Each structure stands twice: as structure tokens, then as C-alpha cells.
Image (spheres, rainbow, N blue to C red):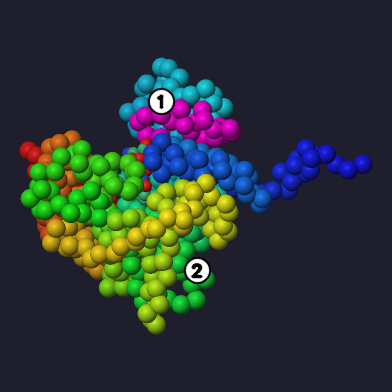
Amino acid sequence: MLPTETAINEQRNREMATTRVAVLGATGSIGTAALGVLRHLDKVDPESRWRLFAASGHGNMKLLGESLDALEHPPEHVILSDPELAPHFSTRHPLGRSSGQSQVSLGPEALVRIASDPMVDVVVAAIVGRAGLESTLAAVEAGKRVALANKETMVVAGSLVQRMVQRSGGEVTPIDSEHSAIFQCLGEKCCKPKKLVLTASGGPFRRWTVEQMENATLKSALNHPTWDMGPKITIDSASMMNKALEVIEARWLFDLPAEAIEVVVHPQSIIHSMIEFDDGSVIAQLSPPDMRLPIQYALTYPRRLPCEVPTLDRSQRWDLTLEPVDRDRFPALDLGFEVARAGGTTGAVLNAANEAAVGLFLEDKIRFTDVVAACRTCLDNHTFDANPSLDTLLKLDTWARGEVRKMTQ
Ligand code: NAD
Ligand code: MG
């Protein structure tokens, strides 16, 4: 008697490996997309079942509950990282109906615990800003695959991450579209590239004058032409600080000096980045501006599986343009190259000053152009250390935030 289709499927399921994933920052733009990618992979991957083992959100319990309710299998662990939530959590059940099956942990320490949990195979680091640092470092130290969206960890502590990866045998697969593009172009890594060319959309102010940017409203800065992202990275894109952070991220991820990194404006956001070899040959990666593709590749690398992102429509004429960055109008980029060259404590200072100043701009307390000016001042005034410990980096993070706050007092 031939086995039924159900029996065959059951047998296949028993034989398949399971990849357990922790999505830290599951309520954000990248986190939500990552949950969708996991659902999709679980259907199309012939080699593995993809399970969301843990998911974290910060202060928005309702949003996290809704995201969890949309899942077929609730995760085993749910983390609410905002310490202020603890009292509310004990008085009423805040999360969606599926969360009854999950173990709920509170506070930022739970992020670190889950990131290094032996049951976890892959950590999607999708928390925004310095808040993602400890959990990302814990995942790297525990030898996980870290699908990295949280570029700020590389900016603050890139050299520490490099050393940790070597010690732990973990791996960092980039989610940031530019770094994913370079990672894809590098392929078999047979030749070291001469140059990494990061593309930048140019953001909403690509054609604005400095005077116009001085008076930019929050609404105009949040109006990104090609990408739909969380507020912090959207403001960073408008000032091109995002590209500055990505230059530093690339410096540490690919272990190349600042001199080997270039930035070029490509408003269509189709070419995600390029590498150039010694013989002048350039290899680029192209796809629609949709983060589900780099998220999926960071999870399945080196395998490629069908992806939900539609392929580029080649039946229409499309123009792909490249233009140089106007460094006078976008001085943030100079800071990125400066930090990529200097290393040491500069990344932590730049990142903290920028996060604090972007926070003030989001609260309408400073002007748009004050953000980069605040970063410049903090970099100039800090005590440089070429080989800082994590403790020194964290102290400087606090110092820089304090300096920026003084701007409004
Ligand atoms: P987002 O604002 O949409 O989401 C941020 C996530 O972090 C949320 O889940 C939030 O709950 C969590 N979070 C916020 N503060 C926290 C705290 N103090 N402690 C713990 N968790 C906290 O941000 P996003 O756009 O998804 O960006 C996330 C990261 O990915 C950033 O580092 C960003 O630079 C990077 N990235 C984003 C995109 C994109 O398309 N959105 C592209 C490339 C890289
Ligand atoms: Mg990017």
C-alpha cells in the first residue's frame, strides 16, 4: 500500500531540521517584516522548519499582541523590554490571545538571556539604536548567527564584535540592504575587493539647500521617497547620517579601511551597493526596495529560496542614475568617514550624540541641522581612547547624551 500524502508530509516534517529564531524588536519595521519572512520560509523551505522561538517588543504591548495573534505558532518566549511596564503587566493581561501559550519575561535583561539561549539558532537583531547593543553582543558571544539590522552596534562597538566573532565562531549576516548587497556580491570571497561603493537614495532633502534644511519640518524629514522605515532611521536618512553610520558599519563588517569605501547617490534605490575589484570590474546587486529580501538572505545564507518580493519589472524602461554626494550640504557623511578612520571611542560618541539629537528633533526641540552640529561638537570635545573597553564606550554614550541634552537647557 502506498503511503498517503499526509503520511509523506508527516515523515518529511520529522526528518526536517528546525531553525529557531529570536526576533528582537519584533514590533518595528524590520521586526514585523522578519515575522512575515519566517512565515513564508516555513512554507517554501524544503530543508528546515522555521520557528519563531522568541519575540520582543518594548513599550507597545498592544502592537506586540497583534503581531503575535497573526502567527500560526506563538513563540515560546515573549519579552517586553521596557522596565516601566512591569507594574502594569501584573495587573492585567496585556498581550493578544496567543500569548497565553508563551512565557512572558520583562525588562532588558531578558533580551540578553534570550539572545544567548542555547535553544536559539538565529537572532534577528532589529532593535533600534544603542538599546540593541547588549543583546546583539550577547548573541555574537554565544556563537549565534546574528541577522543584523541594528547597525548602531557596529558603529558603537565594531572592533569588539569582530573579535567576538573570531572567538565564538558566530557569524553576522547583514540585513541592512547595502551591506547585504555587498555580502551577496562578495560571493565566494575569492578576491578581496578594492572598493565598496554604498548607494544612498539621497533622502527627502536630496535637492534642498542648506537654508531650506535649516527650516525643515518633522513631517518633511519623515517623508522618505523610497523606503518605509522606523522614525529614527528615516531622520538619519534625511541628514545622510544613516549613510555615515553605514560607512562605519561596512568598515567593521567587511574589515576594510575607510579609504576603500565610497558613497554614491542613487535615487531609485534599485542598486543596493557595489564592489569594485583591482581590475576595475564592478559587481552590483539589484532588487526592488523591499527589506524582506535582505532579511530572508540573512536567515538562509548561503542558500537562496523563493522570496515574496516581486522581481524587477523588466518589461518597462527604467533609468538607474548615479550622482556624487554633495558633501557641503550633507556634512554628516564626513563624520562617518572620520569615525571609520579613527575608530576607538569615536563611534560610540557619534552614535549617542546622533540618537539623542534625533530624539530632540523628533520632539520638535531642535532644528534639523542642529543634529549634525551636535554630533560634531561631541566628537571634538570627547576624550579619545584608541582601544576602549565596553565600559568606557558605555560611559561615553551617557556623556554624549548629556552634552546633547544641554543644548535645550
Ligand atoms: P522601528 O522604530 O520601526 O522599530 C524598533 C524596534 O525596537 C521596535 O520593535 C521597538 O519596540 C524596539 N525598541 C525601541 N526602543 C527599544 C528599547 N529601548 N529597548 C528594546 N527595544 C526597543 O525601527 P526599524 O526601522 O525597524 O529599525 C530597526 C533597526 O534596523 C535600526 O537599527 C535601523 O537602523 C535598522 N535598519 C532598518 C531598516 C528599515 O528599513 N526599517 C533598514 C536597514 C536597517
Ligand atoms: Mg541601509
Mark 1 residue element: helix
* Position of 280 relative to 46 (above/below): below
* Position of 44 relative to 331 (above/below): above
What's the mark number on residue 187?
A: 2
Q: Residue drawn 41% across and 25% down?
A: 62
What's the mark number on residue 261?
A: none
- Marks 1 and 2 sit apart, C-alpha to C-alpha, by 41 Å
In front: label 1 or label 2: 2
Q: Is mark 1 within 8 Å of ligand 1?
A: no
Mark 2 residue element: loop
Side of 385 relative to 142 (left or right): left
Identity of the residue furthest to the right in this view: 1
Q: Residue drawn 43% across and 30% down?
A: 64
Instruction: From the top left corner, tell me how far across and down residue 39 is, in percent.
Output: 56, 40
Q: Amino acid at mark 1?
A: Lys
Q: Is mark 2 within 8 Å of ligand 2?
A: no
Side of 240 relative to 74 (left or right): left
Q: Residue drawn 23% across and 66% down?
A: 324
* Position of 127 relative to 293 (above/below): above
Instruction: From the top left corner, tell me how far across and down residue 66 is, in percent.
Output: 46, 28
| Residues rendered magenta in the picture | 57-78
The first of marks 1 and 2 along the sequence is 1
The residue identified by callout 1 is 62
How many numbered marks appear? 2
Mark 2 Cα-neighbour bin, 10 Å: few <14, some 14–19, many ≥20: few
**Callout 1–callout 2 Cβ contact below 8 Å:** no
Q: Amino acid at mark 2?
A: Gly
Quadrant position of residue 110: top left
Q: Is residue 113 magenta?
A: no
Instruction: From the top left corner, tell me how far across and down residue 359 is, in percent.
Output: 21, 40
Q: Quadrant of the N terminus?
A: top right
Side of 277 relative to 352 (left or right): right
